[in-house]
Image (tube, grey):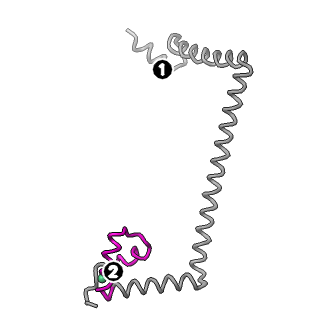
Amino acid sequence: MNAMGCNLIEKAGSYLDGAMNSAERQTFDAHLTTCLECSAEVARIERLSRFIASAEMPAPENLVMKFRMRKNNQKRLVRMATILTGAAAAVLIVTTLSMILHPSDSTPASMSWQTVAVSQQIDASSQSDPDDPIAQLLLQERP
Ligand SMILES: [Zn+2]
């Protein structure tokens, strides 16, 4: 073990986590046979993780609980999204069905909505409302 420390020792964690690709893993495997420091670190982490896994420690359990709660929250969100999507689909189906079943009812309604929108647009541009500041501006800028 040299005094400077091996600069590959930080890879021990990812080596054990399986976060390495096979090439990296092979390189580190080869390194472990020659480097006492890294092989000791790997052994130490393995011992530590075995200890955490076997020991009933309050802190990791709290973490597990928190993680489970977060997962439950995520599940709730997903459920809510599913319900909302279902509701949207239901509205769409009902709307489509009512249009299919009562075409005479729905078509005039949508036509009148369009007529109102268009007529309001025409009103805004053609008529000059004295209380409308935009209309007043337009009137002022007129030659
Ligand atoms: Zn090393």
Residue 98 location in percent, x, y?
A: 72, 25
Please state the extent of the stretch shown in magenta in the rendering: 10-37
- 7 falls in the magenta region: no
The residue to which callout 2 is attached is 9
Residue at x-position 62% and y-position 67%: 68
- 32 falls in the magenta region: yes
Reading the chain from its start, which is encountered first: label 1 or label 2? 2
14 on left or right of 59: left
Residue type at tag 1: Ile
Residue type at tag 2: Ile
Residue 103 location in percent, x, y?
A: 71, 18
Snapshot quadrant of residue 94: top right
Secondary structure at numbered mark 2: helix
Residue at x-position 58% and y-position 13%: 119
Vertical order, 54 against 128 (above or below) = below
Residue at x-position 55% and y-position 18%: 131
Q: Determine if the C-beta at disc 2 is less than 8 A from ligand 1.
A: yes
Split into 4 quadrants, where in the image is the C terminus?
top left
Q: Between label 1 and label 2, give the one nearer the viewer.
A: 2
Vertical order, 81 against 67 (above or below) = above
The residue to which callout 1 is attached is 134
